[in-house]
Structures are given as C-alpha cells and as structure tokens.
C-alpha cells in the first residue's frame, strides 16, 4: 500500500492511496478461505466446498468487504503516518478501480489546528456578588400568601379581585347550548378565565342581582358551533366574596411543607441566592470567554465552521423572514448579516476547540456522578415531572450525550477559573439581573446591542 501526500493547504490535507491488485487478491483469498471452512453447498460436506464455487457465489459481497477494509486501512495509514488529528470525518473518493487492477483513491482530511493555550494565571476577572434583598423575600412571601388566600362574604358590590359565586345559563339565538350552564360557580373577577367581556359585566353587581351578559366567543374557540358567535348568559349572582390573603406565619409555611416561617424564609433566600449565583456565574464565564477569544487566534477547520454557521444562520434567517430581528440587525442586508454571524460562528468554533484542547491536555473528563447531577439539575427545572425527566434521560442515549457536552465545557471552565485571578465585586441584585448588553448601553461606554441569536453565539 502506497500513501502519498498530494496537497497540504492550511488545515487541509489530501493523500493519494494506491493498493496493489496483489494485496487485494491476497485479502480476497484469505476471506474466501474463512468462509469456505463453514459454508455448505449441495453435494459437498461443510468445509469441503471448492474455493472457485465459494468465489462464484459470494465473490461480489466479499469484494465489497475487501475494498471497504482497504479504504479504511489506507485512510488510517495516512492519518497515522502523518501524525494527524482529524477534525472531521475524512472524505474518500475512489479514483480508479477495475477487477484485477490496483485500487486508487484519495483521502481528504481536515486536521485539528495547533493550539497553544495562554497562561491562565495571567487572566484577571471580576466576579459580581449580590446579597439577597429582604424586600424580595417579603415579595415572595406575599405571593405565596396570595396563592393560599381564602375569601369571605361581603355585602357590597363586586369589584375586580372579588369572587362572584354565580349560576348561569348560556344561550345561542335564545336556546341554551351544551356546556354553557353551571350552578354555584366561583369566578374571580379580573382573572380573565372566562370569555372576554364576561367578568367585566359582573363588576358593580351585588348578591341577588340578575344580569344578562352579552359576549361573543373568540373566532378561534375550540367549539366550531360557537366560535365567533354572539351569545347571552343569564347570570344570577348568588354571593360576593372578598379575597382574604393568608397570614404570613408558621401556618403558611406548613401549608407548603416547611416547619416554620423562619424555615420558609431561609428556603426562599436559598432559592433566590442560587438564581443570583447562576447569573453571576454566567457573567463570569462570558467575561472569561471574551478574554480567551481575544488571546487565541488559530485557524479553524472549514467544515466545522460551515456547520456551525449553518446552525446559527437557520435561526437568524427564520427571525429575519418573520420580522423578529432587533432594530440594529433589521436594517442590514443579508450579506452583512451573514458576514457578522460567520464571524461569531468562528468565535464559537475556536472557543470550543480551545476548551476541548485544555480538557484533553489536563485529562478532564465527565464522570457518571457529573451526569447524574446534571440530570437532577434538569429534573428540578420541571417541578412535579421529575420522574418523567429521569426516565427520559435513562431511555435516551442521544439526550445523555447532549447533556455531556455542556457538562464537559463547564468542568473545563471551572479548571481555568481555578487558575485565574478573580476578585469579588459587590453589586445589587437588580444590577446582577440586568442583561449585560443593556448594562453596557447604560454605562458611559460604547453601547452596542446584539440580536438574541448573536448574543447567544458570542456567549458560547
């Protein structure tokens, strides 16, 4: 087998591989002999079938195997002899072959660039830290109390926020329609849970009032017989009840499964604290990626860049055609947008390769414990459906792999941050929650707004 490099341009390598006909025939004979030892044919005992008959029956299939093995071996030799690290799947093109002749093919390979990571000890970053405001804890307690509110009867007219206990009969052209009748229904006015306009016509009414409520069903209503039709509801107000928020005390805490109000406050503080820590982590990572991007400028494999750009541009183009681009991008031509997003795609690929190289050199791996923690984190995002999320990942290998990549990236980022110099910077919770682009625009610097897809590309 002869392997000759015929092109070396940037990260692209191309080789010509020639496999002599004699080697192919030797492989062919060896494979035929393997099959002949076990194959059965009428008139012959197992293992006694002549090779000529075996070749006649199985030759075409075996030739395919031999050629595939030769191509794989030639590709592997090109990679091994050149000490190459392919960045993408090699592309093989057979240039010449006929039965009994040499096999000739070319192998095109895009290789990984040479990556020399900077000294991470020279990186200096600020980590924003925010304390959980007591006011946010009070607001959270108020929301919990509201969700657990009760109500009490009042003798005044109903107003928005009150609960009207009503009997009603809905009529279309004077005839009651199915599903339009109820008794003793508790309707919170202002909740917009009924047909638009229904609740408004009960405001100002007292217990005992009888009201003809005229409304029209929405045009997209699920029942085609009623969609877009004007109807009348004969409503009797049985009772008006005013909301009575639950007291913020130990009993409220017990209603949500905690033993005391202090325990509930600490739980809320912890939840808000984790949210603020996540925001701080995102900002710190974004700052680190900016530093890494500014200090590394190696070439990226063209195929990887093309694939990344296609993924990003697909979303951008959908937004462009739907008129969802922000003002800064909306005024740009397609060519201008493509140029900008290709630059961002290149940043993403370069940072991905850099982080992968740092992880490889430093033997950073994703363990099963890391994956288990990642799954539990995902499950917590869907309260009440945790078991379904766990089953999803247990049964879906592709989903597990999609979880592995970001976990690996976070471990590499943690490794770099351990080496960097990081100073904590106290900020308010409100400032920490601000979008970094909006915060930059508010500061006396160079404001520049990015589209959502552009910002996402820059962050990763």
Image (tube, rainbow, N blue to C red):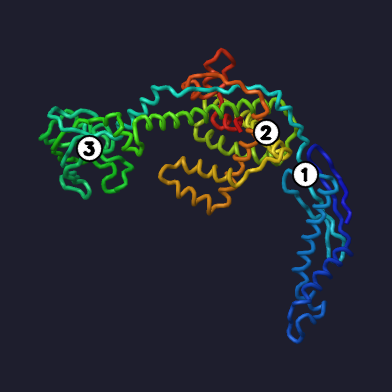
Question: Who comes first in sequence, dot 2 or dot 3?
Answer: 3
Residue beneath the point at 60% across and 37% down: 312
Crowding at mark 2 (Cα within 10 Å: few <14, some 14-19, many 20+)? many
Q: Name the residue under label 3.
A: 187
Circle 2 SS class = helix
- How many numbered discs sit on the rendered protein? 3
33 vs 391: above or below: below
Residue beneath the point at 64% across and 39% down: 308
Q: Distance of mark 1 from mark 2, alpha carbons? A: 18 Å
Give percent across and percent down for residue 46.
Answer: 75, 82
Q: Mark 1 points at which residue?
A: 85
Considering depth in this image, is 388 or 216 the residue closer to the camera? 388
Which residue appears farthest toward the bottom when viewing the image? 43
Q: Distance of mark 3 from mark 1, alpha carbons? A: 67 Å
201 vs 44: above or below: above
Circle 3 SS class = strand
Seen in the image, is 6 located left or right of residue 411? right
Crowding at mark 3 (Cα within 10 Å: few <14, some 14-19, many 20+)? some
Q: Quadrant of the C terminus?
A: top right
158 vs 363: above or below: above
365 vs 38: above or below: above
Seen in the image, is 163 located left or right of residue 42? left
Q: Mark 2 points at which residue?
A: 351
Residue beneath the point at 77% across and 68% down: 62
Question: Who comes first in sequence, dot 1 or dot 2?
Answer: 1
Quarter of the view holding residue 56 = bottom right
Quarter of the view holding residue 270 = top left
Residue beneath the point at 47% across and 28% down: 273
């Amino acid at each position: 087998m002869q392997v000759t490099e015929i092109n070396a341009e940037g990260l692209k390598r191309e080789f010509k591989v020639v496999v002599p006909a004699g080697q192919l025939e030797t492989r062919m004979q060896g494979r035929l002999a393997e099959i002949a030892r076990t194959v059965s044919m009428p008139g012959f005992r197992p293992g006694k079938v002549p090779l000529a008959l075996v070749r006649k029956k199985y030759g075409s299939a075996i030739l395919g195997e031999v050629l595939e093995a030769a191509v794989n071996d030639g590709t592997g030799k090109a990679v091994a002899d050149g000490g190459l690290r392919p960045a993408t799947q090699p592309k093989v093109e057979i240039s010449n072959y006929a039965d009994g002749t040499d096999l000739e093919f070319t192998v095109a390979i895009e290789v990984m660039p040479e990556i020399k990571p900077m000294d991470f000890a020279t990186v200096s970053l600020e980590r924003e830290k925010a304390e959980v405001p007591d006011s946010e804890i009070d607001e959270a307690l108020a929301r919990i109390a509201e969700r657990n509110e009760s109500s009490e009867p009042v003798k005044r007219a109903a107003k928005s926020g009150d609960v009207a206990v009503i009997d009603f009969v809905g009529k279309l052209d004077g005839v009651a329609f199915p599903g339009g009748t109820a008794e003793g229904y508790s309707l919170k006015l202002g909740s917009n849970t009924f047909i638009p306009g229904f609740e408004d016509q009960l405001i100002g009414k007292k217990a005992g009032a009888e009201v003809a409520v005229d409304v029209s069903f929405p045009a997209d209503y699920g029942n085609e017989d009623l969609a877009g039709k004007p109807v009348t509801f004969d409503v009797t107000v049985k009772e008006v009840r005013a909301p009575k928020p639950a007291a913020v005390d130990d009993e409220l805490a017990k209603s949500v499964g905690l033993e005391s109000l202090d325990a509930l406050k600490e739980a809320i503080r912890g939840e808000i604290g984790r949210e603020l820590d996540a925001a701080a982590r995102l900002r710190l990572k974004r700052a680190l990626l900016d530093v890494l991007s500014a200090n590394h400028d190696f070439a990226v494999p063209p195929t990887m860049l093309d694939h990344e750009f296609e993924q990003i541009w697909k979303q951008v183009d959908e937004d462009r055609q739907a008129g969802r681009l922000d003002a800064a991008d909306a005024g740009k031509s397609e060519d201008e947008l493509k140029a900008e997003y290709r630059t961002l795609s290149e940043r993403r690929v370069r940072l991905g390769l850099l982080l992968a190289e740092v992880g490889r050199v430093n033997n950073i791996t994703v363990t099963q414990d890391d994956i288990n923690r990642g799954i539990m984190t995902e499950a917590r995002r869907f309260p009440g459906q945790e078991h379904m999320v766990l089953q999803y990942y247990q049964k879906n290998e592709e989903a597990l792999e999609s979880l592995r990549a970001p976990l690996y990236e976070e471990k590499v980022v943690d490794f770099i941050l351990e080496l960097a110099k990081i100073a904590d910077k106290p900020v308010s919770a409100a400032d920490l929650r601000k979008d970094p682009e909006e915060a930059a625009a508010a500061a006396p610097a160079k404001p520049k707004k990015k589209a959502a897809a552009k910002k996402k590309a820059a962050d990763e």
